[in-house]
Image (spheres, rainbow, N blue to C red):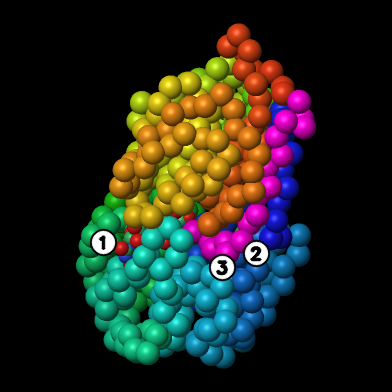
Amino acid sequence: MERLVIEGGRRLAGSLRVHGSKNAALPILAAVTMADEETLIRDVPNLEDIHVMLDILRSVGAKVRYVDHQVYIDPTSIETTVIPDHLMSQMRSSIFLMGPLLARFGMVRISKPGGCSIGSRPIDFHLKGLEQLGAEVIDRHGYIECRANRLRGGAIFLDFPSVGATENLMMAACLAEGETVIGNAAREPEIRDLAAFLTTLGARISGAGDDTIVIEGVRRLHGGQFDVSPDRIVTGTLLIAGAVTGGHVVLTNVRPSDSTAVIMKLREAGVQISASRDILEVRESSELRAIDRVQTAPFPGFPTDLQAPLMALLSMAKGTSIVSETVFEDRFRHVPELLRMGASIKVDLRTAFVRGVKELSGAPVSATDLRAGAALVVAGDDIVARTKGRRARASPFSTVCYCTLWNIVDA
Ligand code: UD1
């Protein structure tokens, strides 16, 4: 899908079940390579990145079947631990295979991922951590090769609570000899999900979801079955889309406690949200208001993946909002696109000053990454006019947003 044409002005209304999380599913699929029996993962979203990961698993010899959001993987036939370049280059998340393949087979070779559209995205924490577990890491000619007869547990401290590094090292440590302690670990819900899955396979992990994770290595991981948790980023994006169109949206299969920062910020902007155990509901909001300040941060802070969609909403909120991006160094590439649609935004280094305008107008725009694309879809949806402080639908013909999606990378 290279091009989306969005005709704005429709109020979103209805109920939707949120699917399993992409960011949780990707490391879980990589972790399956450590098991020595068939494994079933359920609620795996039907997305391009997921299929690239499944192709990578097939390319190393695993038997994989994807049927209706369920993935059966038999890793017992894996015969190589060299990831083909053409698959590696399609998806950054292939680096999740480093820890598991190294731990299980003693060697892994990948082509080195480059920077991407949200920043330079180094993998130094992953490599340093693997070295601390006893791996020899050879970084030459654009390839990274890691070797170790058997990894041994150790103490790792991350300079920043990187989600991917925490996941990679937690996976590797499961089959290492002895105890591993990961300090300053990421606390994202996807870490908890991965730890719960690994535990199902027989791993011994405590502290996942806190900033110190302790893993007691085991000799083998067996098969098992697991349900991936709902996608909190999709949840947030749909809440924002519902709010922007003045709609009434009910989301089921959600975990409100994973979206606390987003719910609080949307309420601050005047959005009416109610939450129950596994349901979130956005009701027609009156006027959207600017937010004093929102700053992205590792969980439980405001997620960087929702910064662009939130900015699309704030572009139409009354007053000036301040949005700071602290996680990635180059994650404002959606700003010029929103400007093309009539937004008023000024950027100073990692802070954007967003002055709300009455409405946006359709324009041809480009999405530089997945979440920026989501922001532009959200912006394209909004053409509601505000009369006397109430939101009313404008003519469906007044705005057509041509959103050309190209060069999209996974984040
Ligand atoms: C994951 C998510 C992504 C989300 C991000 C932050 C997946 C597939 N992707 O990406 O959607 O936006 O978490 O919540 O789960 N860093 C280093 N060295 C490293 C690793 C990271 O300097 O070795 C830096 C990064 O450049 C970035 C920061 O740490 O500035 C956070 O990155 P990280 O948490 O690792 O993000 P990802 O795991 O790549």
Query: What amino acid type should be assigned to the residue bearing mark 1?
Result: Leu
Which mark's residue is nearer the viewer, 1 or 3? 1
User: Closer to the camera, 117 or 371?
Assistant: 117
Q: Which residue is mark 1?
A: 158
Residue range corresponding to the magenta coloring? 395-411
Residue 219 screen position, x and y as percent: 41, 78
Q: Which residue is mark 2?
A: 48
The quadrant in which residue 173 appears is bottom left
The answer to whether mark 2 and mark 1 are in CB contact below 8 A is no
The disc, 1 or 3, on the residue closer to the chain's N-terminal end is: 3
The quadrant in which residue 169 appears is bottom left
Residue at mark 1 to residue at mark 3: CA–CA distance: 24 Å
Q: Which residue is mark 3?
A: 29
Residue 351 screen position, x and y as percent: 33, 41
Q: Residues within 10 Å of mark 1 (few under 14, many from 20)?
A: some
- The quarter in which the N terminus is drawn is bottom right
Which mark's residue is nearer the viewer, 2 or 3? 2
111 in the magenta segment: no
- Left or right, 134 with reference to 394: left
Q: Quadrant of ligand 1?
A: bottom left
At 54% from the left edge and 63% from the top edge, which residue is drawn? 409
Overall secondary structure of the magenta section: loop
